[in-house]
Image (tube, grey):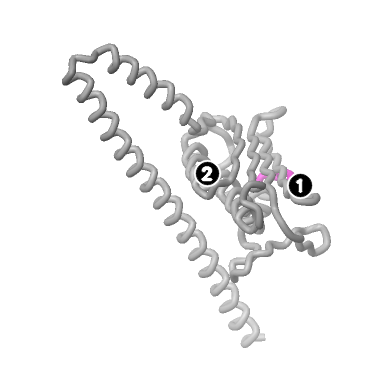
Amino acid sequence: MGLFSVLFGRMIDKRIHSYQNDLITKHCEEVQNIYNQMRGWRHDYHNHIQTMKAHLALDQTTEVKAYLGKLDADLSDVDTVIKTGNIMVDAILNSKLSLANARKINVNAKAIVPSSMNISEIDLCVIIGNLLDNAMEACMNQANPTERYIRLYMSILKEQLYISVSNSFDGEVVKSGKAYISTKGSESRGFGLMRIDRIVDKYDGYINRQHEKGVFATEIVLPL
C-alpha cells in the first residue's frame, strides 16, 4: 500500500505539472497575440499620423476631416471587445476570444455578468478559460479551417448565471458512462473538465454536455 501511494502520488504530481505547463503555454500564446496586436496598432497609428501631416502641410483641412471620419468609422467596425459588466470576466473573455480570432476561428459572443456576485470571480474565470480552451483545441483539430466556429452566450436568467459554449469539432468524442473524457494527447488529459465539474458542484450548479455530428455544446447554470 505504501509503494502504491508513492507511485500514485508521483503520477498525480506529473499530471498536475503537465497541466500547469499547458496553462503557462496558453498564457504565453495569449500574451504574444496581444503584443502582436499592439505592434500592428502602433504601425497603423504611425502611418495615419504621417498621412494627416502630409495633408496639413498642403493645407488640405477638408481632406484631414474626411480622413478622421474614416478612421472613426473603422474603429467602430473593429471594436469587438466584449464588455460584460465584470472586469475580471472581461479580461479572460477578451484574451481568449482575441486568440481565437488570431487562429481564424469564427467567433460569435454575447455576455452579461453581474459586477458583484456570490460566485468567486476566479472560479468563474477558471470555468470560462477551460471552456474556451477546449473549444479552440477542438476547432484547431478540424481539417477544414473555414468550418471552425465558437458560439458563447452568458446571461442572467431567473437569478442564475447561464453559460453556453458550443463549437465545431471533427472526429469522435469519448465517454465513460455519462461523463465525457478529454481526447487531448497530453498527460493533462481531463484536468480542465475536472476543474469545471468541481466548481459547478461547489456552487450546487448544473452542467450539461451534449454533442451531435460536428457540434459540441456545454451548458452551465450557477445560482446567484
Q: Secondary structure at mark 1?
A: strand
Q: Which image quadrant: the C terminus?
A: top right
Disc assigned to residue 101: 2
Image spot of residue 47 (x, y percent) = 28, 34
The answer to whether residue 74 is above or below residue 194 is: above
Query: Which residue, given by chain and number where applicable, does mark 1 sit on?
Result: 208
Residue at 60% over, 83% down: 7
Residue at 72% over, 43% down: 219
- Asked if the stretch drawn in magenta spans residue 214, the answer is no
Specify the amino acid type for callout 2.
Answer: Asn
The answer to whether residue 151 is above or below residue 72 is: below
Image spot of residue 221 (x, y percent) = 70, 40
Left or right position of 179 against 164: right
Q: Looking at the image, can residue 43 be seen?
A: yes
Tag 1: Cα neighbours inside 10 Å, few (<14), some, or many (≥20)? Answer: few
The answer to whether residue 178 is above or below residue 146 is: below
Q: Nearer the viewer, mark 1 or mark 2?
A: 2
Image spot of residue 59 (x, y percent) = 18, 14
